[in-house]
Image (cartoon, rainbow, N blue to C red):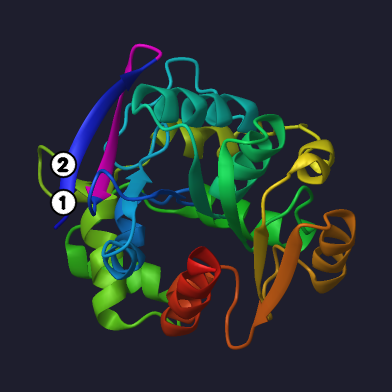
Amino acid sequence: MLSDQTVTLHGSRFHYTERGERTAPAVIMLHGVTGHARTWDDEGAALAGHYRVLALDQRGHGDSDPPPDADYGVASLAGDLAAFVDALGLSTFSVVALSMGGRVAIQYAGTHPGRVSRLVVVDIGPDIAPEGRMRVGRMMAGTPERFNTLDDVVAYQRANNPRYTEALLRARVKYGVRPLPDGGFTWKYDRGLRDLVRSGKWSDPIDLWPAWRAITCPTLLVRGVESDILTAPLAKTMAEAQPKARLVDVAGAGHTVPGDQPETFRKLLREFLDA
Protein backbone atom coordinates (compact mmCIF):
# COMPACT_ATOMS: atom_id res chain seq x y z
CA MET A 1 0.00 0.00 0.00
CA LEU A 2 1.25 3.47 -0.88
CA SER A 3 1.57 6.11 1.81
CA ASP A 4 2.38 9.81 1.45
CA GLN A 5 5.13 11.12 3.72
CA THR A 6 6.91 14.41 4.31
CA VAL A 7 10.31 15.29 5.69
CA THR A 8 12.01 18.63 6.31
CA LEU A 9 15.41 19.05 4.65
CA HIS A 10 17.45 22.28 4.83
CA GLY A 11 14.34 23.99 6.23
CA SER A 12 12.15 23.01 3.24
CA ARG A 13 9.33 20.49 3.09
CA PHE A 14 9.86 17.46 0.85
CA HIS A 15 7.17 14.97 -0.10
CA TYR A 16 7.77 11.33 -0.90
CA THR A 17 5.76 8.15 -1.31
CA GLU A 18 6.54 4.91 0.44
CA ARG A 19 5.65 1.28 -0.28
CA GLY A 20 6.76 -2.04 1.18
CA GLU A 21 8.09 -3.12 4.55
CA ARG A 22 10.42 -0.73 6.33
CA THR A 23 12.76 -3.60 7.13
CA ALA A 24 13.16 -4.51 3.44
CA PRO A 25 16.11 -3.29 1.30
CA ALA A 26 15.48 0.32 0.30
CA VAL A 27 15.10 1.54 -3.29
CA ILE A 28 14.96 5.29 -3.93
CA MET A 29 13.36 6.48 -7.15
CA LEU A 30 14.10 9.88 -8.69
CA HIS A 31 11.98 11.43 -11.45
CA GLY A 32 13.03 13.67 -14.32
CA VAL A 33 12.60 17.41 -14.79
CA THR A 34 8.91 18.50 -14.71
CA GLY A 35 8.04 15.10 -13.20
CA HIS A 36 6.97 13.91 -9.76
CA ALA A 37 7.17 10.94 -7.40
CA ARG A 38 3.92 9.40 -8.65
CA THR A 39 5.47 8.75 -12.06
CA TRP A 40 7.01 5.69 -10.36
CA ASP A 41 3.71 4.23 -9.08
CA ASP A 42 3.70 1.16 -11.32
CA GLU A 43 7.37 0.37 -10.71
CA GLY A 44 6.90 0.91 -6.99
CA ALA A 45 3.95 -1.46 -6.89
CA ALA A 46 5.97 -4.09 -8.79
CA LEU A 47 8.88 -3.86 -6.35
CA ALA A 48 7.06 -3.41 -3.04
CA GLY A 49 6.79 -7.13 -2.31
CA HIS A 50 10.56 -7.34 -1.84
CA TYR A 51 11.74 -3.76 -1.28
CA ARG A 52 11.00 -0.59 0.65
CA VAL A 53 10.32 1.78 -2.24
CA LEU A 54 10.77 5.51 -1.63
CA ALA A 55 9.89 7.88 -4.48
CA LEU A 56 11.02 11.43 -3.79
CA ASP A 57 9.48 14.63 -5.12
CA GLN A 58 12.67 16.56 -5.82
CA ARG A 59 12.85 20.26 -4.95
CA GLY A 60 10.26 22.36 -6.75
CA HIS A 61 8.47 19.30 -8.16
CA GLY A 62 5.30 17.51 -7.15
CA ASP A 63 4.40 18.41 -3.58
CA SER A 64 7.89 19.46 -2.44
CA ASP A 65 8.77 23.08 -1.76
CA PRO A 66 10.62 25.08 -4.42
CA PRO A 67 14.05 26.35 -3.41
CA PRO A 68 13.98 30.00 -2.28
CA ASP A 69 16.99 30.79 -4.46
CA ALA A 70 15.73 28.97 -7.60
CA ASP A 71 18.77 26.68 -7.41
CA TYR A 72 18.16 23.56 -9.51
CA GLY A 73 21.80 22.59 -9.95
CA VAL A 74 22.72 18.90 -9.83
CA ALA A 75 25.03 19.39 -6.85
CA SER A 76 22.21 20.96 -4.83
CA LEU A 77 19.73 18.23 -5.78
CA ALA A 78 22.33 15.61 -4.84
CA GLY A 79 22.63 17.42 -1.51
CA ASP A 80 18.88 16.97 -1.07
CA LEU A 81 19.27 13.24 -1.71
CA ALA A 82 22.10 13.05 0.84
CA ALA A 83 19.97 14.84 3.44
CA PHE A 84 16.97 12.64 2.60
CA VAL A 85 18.73 9.30 3.14
CA ASP A 86 20.38 10.57 6.31
CA ALA A 87 17.05 11.81 7.67
CA LEU A 88 15.54 8.37 7.05
CA GLY A 89 18.55 6.62 8.56
CA LEU A 90 19.42 4.65 5.42
CA SER A 91 22.99 3.37 5.42
CA THR A 92 22.81 1.60 2.04
CA PHE A 93 20.16 1.60 -0.69
CA SER A 94 19.60 1.23 -4.41
CA VAL A 95 18.70 4.15 -6.67
CA VAL A 96 16.55 4.12 -9.82
CA ALA A 97 16.64 7.46 -11.59
CA LEU A 98 15.43 8.97 -14.86
CA SER A 99 16.82 11.95 -16.77
CA MET A 100 17.49 14.83 -14.34
CA GLY A 101 17.15 12.32 -11.52
CA GLY A 102 19.79 10.19 -13.21
CA ARG A 103 22.27 13.05 -13.18
CA VAL A 104 21.55 13.58 -9.48
CA ALA A 105 22.08 9.86 -8.85
CA ILE A 106 25.39 9.85 -10.75
CA GLN A 107 26.66 12.76 -8.68
CA TYR A 108 25.56 11.18 -5.41
CA ALA A 109 26.79 7.64 -6.16
CA GLY A 110 30.15 8.92 -7.38
CA THR A 111 30.75 11.06 -4.30
CA HIS A 112 29.32 8.63 -1.71
CA PRO A 113 30.95 5.28 -2.56
CA GLY A 114 29.62 2.50 -0.39
CA ARG A 115 26.19 4.05 0.19
CA VAL A 116 24.57 2.99 -3.11
CA SER A 117 24.34 -0.79 -3.51
CA ARG A 118 22.85 -0.79 -7.02
CA LEU A 119 22.21 2.02 -9.48
CA VAL A 120 19.84 2.25 -12.44
CA VAL A 121 20.37 5.31 -14.67
CA VAL A 122 17.67 5.81 -17.29
CA ASP A 123 18.52 7.63 -20.53
CA ILE A 124 20.89 10.29 -19.31
CA GLY A 125 24.60 10.83 -18.90
CA PRO A 126 27.27 13.35 -17.96
CA ASP A 127 26.63 15.02 -21.34
CA ILE A 128 23.27 15.72 -22.96
CA ALA A 129 22.78 15.68 -26.74
CA PRO A 130 22.19 19.27 -27.95
CA GLU A 131 19.11 18.32 -29.99
CA GLY A 132 17.42 16.76 -26.96
CA ARG A 133 18.41 19.60 -24.67
CA MET A 134 16.89 22.11 -27.09
CA ARG A 135 13.69 20.06 -27.42
CA VAL A 136 13.18 19.93 -23.65
CA GLY A 137 13.95 23.63 -23.36
CA ARG A 138 11.41 24.52 -26.04
CA MET A 139 8.80 22.33 -24.36
CA MET A 140 9.31 23.93 -20.94
CA ALA A 141 9.47 27.47 -22.28
CA GLY A 142 6.42 27.07 -24.48
CA THR A 143 4.13 25.20 -22.11
CA PRO A 144 0.87 26.96 -21.17
CA GLU A 145 0.58 28.18 -17.59
CA ARG A 146 -3.15 27.45 -17.38
CA PHE A 147 -5.45 24.71 -18.65
CA ASN A 148 -9.24 24.78 -18.43
CA THR A 149 -9.69 21.06 -17.77
CA LEU A 150 -7.68 17.94 -17.02
CA ASP A 151 -8.63 16.70 -20.49
CA ASP A 152 -6.82 19.72 -21.92
CA VAL A 153 -3.68 18.78 -19.99
CA VAL A 154 -3.92 15.18 -21.19
CA ALA A 155 -4.26 16.35 -24.80
CA TYR A 156 -1.21 18.59 -24.40
CA GLN A 157 0.83 15.81 -22.84
CA ARG A 158 -0.25 13.28 -25.46
CA ALA A 159 1.64 15.23 -28.11
CA ASN A 160 4.84 14.84 -26.07
CA ASN A 161 4.22 11.22 -25.07
CA PRO A 162 2.66 9.41 -28.03
CA ARG A 163 3.46 5.88 -26.74
CA TYR A 164 1.94 6.22 -23.27
CA THR A 165 -1.26 4.34 -22.57
CA GLU A 166 -4.25 6.52 -21.81
CA ALA A 167 -4.38 5.30 -18.20
CA LEU A 168 -0.70 6.03 -17.62
CA LEU A 169 -0.90 9.47 -19.18
CA ARG A 170 -3.94 10.42 -17.09
CA ALA A 171 -2.21 9.27 -13.92
CA ARG A 172 0.84 11.39 -14.73
CA VAL A 173 -1.41 14.39 -15.33
CA LYS A 174 -3.52 13.82 -12.21
CA TYR A 175 -0.52 14.15 -9.91
CA GLY A 176 1.37 16.68 -12.04
CA VAL A 177 -1.06 19.60 -11.87
CA ARG A 178 -2.92 21.55 -9.19
CA PRO A 179 -6.21 23.47 -9.30
CA LEU A 180 -6.14 27.25 -9.53
CA PRO A 181 -8.26 29.42 -7.19
CA ASP A 182 -10.21 30.91 -10.12
CA GLY A 183 -10.70 27.60 -11.89
CA GLY A 184 -8.59 25.56 -14.24
CA PHE A 185 -5.24 23.92 -13.57
CA THR A 186 -1.54 24.69 -13.65
CA TRP A 187 1.60 22.61 -13.28
CA LYS A 188 2.77 21.57 -9.84
CA TYR A 189 6.43 21.91 -10.71
CA ASP A 190 7.89 25.33 -9.99
CA ARG A 191 7.05 28.12 -12.41
CA GLY A 192 10.38 29.62 -11.42
CA LEU A 193 12.09 26.74 -13.21
CA ARG A 194 10.14 27.43 -16.40
CA ASP A 195 10.96 31.11 -16.12
CA LEU A 196 14.66 30.25 -15.82
CA VAL A 197 14.37 28.35 -19.09
CA ARG A 198 12.44 31.18 -20.76
CA SER A 199 15.05 33.72 -19.73
CA GLY A 200 17.92 31.53 -20.90
CA LYS A 201 19.36 31.44 -17.37
CA TRP A 202 18.92 27.74 -16.64
CA SER A 203 22.36 26.20 -16.88
CA ASP A 204 24.47 23.82 -14.82
CA PRO A 205 28.12 23.55 -15.82
CA ILE A 206 28.85 20.59 -13.53
CA ASP A 207 31.21 17.97 -14.93
CA LEU A 208 29.72 14.57 -14.06
CA TRP A 209 32.39 12.44 -15.73
CA PRO A 210 34.56 12.20 -12.58
CA ALA A 211 31.52 11.10 -10.55
CA TRP A 212 30.51 8.57 -13.22
CA ARG A 213 33.99 7.03 -13.24
CA ALA A 214 34.06 6.95 -9.42
CA ILE A 215 30.91 4.82 -9.04
CA THR A 216 31.73 1.52 -7.34
CA CYS A 217 28.37 -0.30 -7.34
CA PRO A 218 26.80 -2.47 -10.07
CA THR A 219 25.12 -0.06 -12.48
CA LEU A 220 22.50 -0.54 -15.19
CA LEU A 221 22.43 2.13 -17.91
CA VAL A 222 19.13 2.00 -19.80
CA ARG A 223 18.83 3.84 -23.11
CA GLY A 224 15.81 4.32 -25.36
CA VAL A 225 16.88 3.45 -28.91
CA GLU A 226 15.06 6.52 -30.25
CA SER A 227 16.33 8.87 -27.53
CA ASP A 228 17.49 12.35 -28.49
CA ILE A 229 18.98 12.87 -25.02
CA LEU A 230 21.38 9.95 -24.65
CA THR A 231 22.92 9.16 -28.03
CA ALA A 232 24.31 5.72 -28.87
CA PRO A 233 27.94 6.99 -29.07
CA LEU A 234 27.64 8.72 -25.69
CA ALA A 235 26.12 5.63 -24.09
CA LYS A 236 28.97 3.54 -25.50
CA THR A 237 31.53 5.98 -24.09
CA MET A 238 29.83 5.81 -20.69
CA ALA A 239 29.91 2.02 -20.68
CA GLU A 240 33.60 2.02 -21.62
CA ALA A 241 34.41 4.57 -18.90
CA GLN A 242 32.64 2.67 -16.11
CA PRO A 243 33.51 -1.03 -15.73
CA LYS A 244 30.65 -1.56 -13.26
CA ALA A 245 28.07 -0.45 -15.83
CA ARG A 246 26.02 -2.60 -18.18
CA LEU A 247 24.29 -0.86 -21.10
CA VAL A 248 20.86 -2.01 -22.29
CA ASP A 249 19.13 -0.47 -25.32
CA VAL A 250 15.32 -0.62 -25.29
CA ALA A 251 13.65 -0.72 -28.70
CA GLY A 252 10.48 1.25 -29.33
CA ALA A 253 11.38 3.82 -26.68
CA GLY A 254 12.52 7.39 -26.66
CA HIS A 255 13.81 9.32 -23.65
CA THR A 256 11.09 8.25 -21.20
CA VAL A 257 11.75 4.51 -21.34
CA PRO A 258 9.56 3.58 -18.31
CA GLY A 259 6.51 5.18 -19.94
CA ASP A 260 7.24 4.12 -23.52
CA GLN A 261 7.96 0.44 -22.75
CA PRO A 262 6.74 -0.13 -19.18
CA GLU A 263 6.69 -3.94 -19.18
CA THR A 264 10.17 -4.21 -20.64
CA PHE A 265 11.51 -1.64 -18.19
CA ARG A 266 9.96 -3.30 -15.14
CA LYS A 267 11.39 -6.65 -16.18
CA LEU A 268 14.87 -5.14 -16.51
CA LEU A 269 14.46 -3.43 -13.16
CA ARG A 270 13.43 -6.55 -11.25
CA GLU A 271 16.14 -8.72 -12.81
CA PHE A 272 18.85 -6.18 -12.02
CA LEU A 273 17.77 -5.39 -8.45
CA ASP A 274 17.18 -9.04 -7.60
CA ALA A 275 20.52 -10.24 -9.00
| Residue 129 place in picture, x, y as percent | 78, 59
Q: What amino acid type should be assigned to the residue bearing mark 1?
A: Gly
| Overall secondary structure of the magenta section | strand
Q: Amino acid at mark 2?
A: Leu
- Towards the viewer: 252 or 268: 268
Relative height, residue 67 to residue 206 (above, below): above
Q: Is residue 11 magenta?
A: yes
Asked if labels 2 and 1 touch by Cβ distance under 8 angstroms, the answer is yes
Q: Under tag 2, what secondary structure? A: loop
Q: Which residue is pictured at 21% across the width and 59% down the height? A: 174
The residues bearing labels 1 and 2 have C-alpha atoms spaced at a distance of 6 Å
* Residue visible at 31% across and 70% down in the picture: 46
Looking at this rendering, what residue extends furthest in the top direction? 11
- For image coordinates 43% across by 21% down, the residue present is 67
Badge count? 2
**What is the quadrant of the N terminus in the image?**
bottom left
Instruction: Left or right? Give the position of 169 relative to 256.
Output: left
Say whether residue 214 is visible: yes
**Place of residue 55 in the rendered image (x, y in percent of width and height, measured from the top left):** 35, 48
Question: Where does label 2 land, which residue?
Answer: 180
Residue 20 horizontal side relative to residue 265, left or right = left
Residue 44 as seen in the image, left or right of residue 10: left
Asked if 101 appears above or below 246 in the picture, the reply is above
Q: Which residue matches tag 1?
A: 184
Find residue 263 and report its image quarter: bottom left
- Please provide the residue range marked out in magenta: 10-18
Please rate how many residues cluster around mark 2, counting C-alpha atoms within 10 Å: few if below 14, some from 14 to 19, many from 20. Answer: few
Tell me if I can see residue 161 in this picture. no
